[in-house]
Amino acid sequence: MTRANLTALIAAVADTISSHADELTSLDQAIGDGDHGLNMKRGFEAVRADAATLGEKPLPEALKAIGTKLVMTVGGASGPLFGTLFMTLGKEIASEPGRPDFAAALAKSIDAVAARGKSQPGQKTMLDVLYPVQAAVAAGKSPSEIADLADAAAEATKPLKAIRGRASFLGDRSIGHMDAGARSTALIVRAVAETLEADA
Amino acid sequence: MKNVGIVIVSHSSKVAEGTADMVRQMVGEEVPLAWCGGNADGGLGTQVGAIMEAIDKAWSEAGVAILVDLGGAETNSEMAVEMIGEPRSHKIAICNAPIVEGAVMAATEASGGASLKDVVATAHELAPA
């Protein structure tokens, strides 16, 4: 991965999170505490502000720094969860990763998110998008296929009942709403996929 | 300070401060105490950086017990403990207890010179079974 496209990736992710902040907040208001959009926007805009410095770092260091920045700025449970994803990815990834390296590092990162959230797939969380995305990355799917699959996986959280997080307080009433964290994860996946595809 | 310190982490700065007031009324200056609450914009939420500062402020060689309200406060507190890292992280425990009652009971136990383990156990007795 070149420096230029790391900066482009950061911009693409921050753009999509910021432009969907209201939608994420609405999703979170339906079954959570309604701060997801603003929290994620604050975090990813803080990452964007550091994009030039981040672009100078080797990929593992840049990913760790992005994770730390999210942890320190998001200000909800999403901070440690998305932060852990990027921090672990930075810890596990090679400087110039091929697809198998990326898939392996991503698998470890997703397990770390599951451990941080004491959660597992099927509980109406970001994990319900992350695990299928990792499987698609490992299976050699194209970026656009992976982006579509992420959207479908987020959509598929609607009928699930929340077991973790604030939405779990609502029990059965969480059914029928898309999980906000699953939606933001799908947005990030699409932004990354489209940027990589344009770059290829 | 030889007594265990207490840190209160709420989504609301008012809840955190109010809980700290109740703890102070109970134990005076016998226990190191710090609180934090709210996000960077002054709204409801919890912040890892603020939790790390509160732990530093309430630091005691005997350890620090953290009382939290809802899920994000717990996740952010766990992250803060991990970022503080070893060896201090071994002396920090997050209590599974209602924030107000837990903080008052934990601080009362701490004021008598109890170990971190005993302070945490006292708070845990308040947790719903």
Image (cartoon, coloured by chain):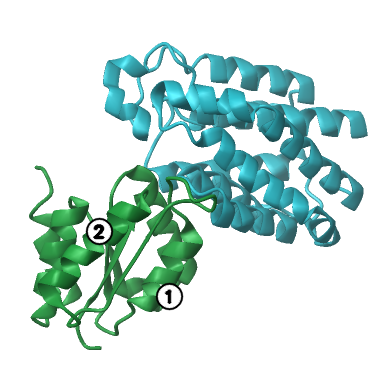
Residue count near mark 2 (Cα–Cα under 10 Å), binned few <14, some 14–19, many ≥20? some
Left or right placement of residue A64 versus residue B46 in this view: right
Q: Chain of mark 2?
A: B
Residue count near mark 1 (Cα–Cα under 10 Å), binned few <14, some 14–19, many ≥20? few
Q: Do the residues at discs 1 and 2 belong to one chain?
A: yes
For the question of whether residue A105 can be seen, the reply is no
Q: Amino acid at mark 2?
A: Gly
Residue B7 image point, x, y percent: 30, 67
Q: Chain of mark 1?
A: B
Residue at 50% across, 42% down = A78
For the question of whether residue A58 can be seen, the reply is yes
Left or right placement of residue B121 versus residue A99 in this view: left
Residue A104 image point, x, y percent: 64, 43
Please, is residue A9 above or below residue B87 in the view? above
Element at badge 1?
A: loop
Residue receiving disc 1? B86
Left or right placement of residue A129 versus residue B64 in this view: right
The numbered disc on residue B97 is: none
Residue at 38% across, 77% down = B57
Left or right placement of residue A137 versus residue A181 in this view: right
Residue receiving disc 2? B18
Residue B115 image point, x, y percent: 15, 77
Residue at 62% across, 30% down = A21
Rounded to the nearest angstrom, the CA distance separating label 1 from label 2 is 31 Å
Q: Residues at badges 1 and 2 in contact (C-beta under 8 Å)?
A: no
Please, is residue A167 above or below residue B102 in the view? above
- Mark 1 vs mark 2: which is more N-terminal? 2
Element at badge 2?
A: helix
Q: Any idea which chain is the cyan one in this picture?
A: A
| Colour chain B appears in | green
Quadrant of the image occupied by residue B101: bottom left
Q: Amino acid at mark 1?
A: Glu
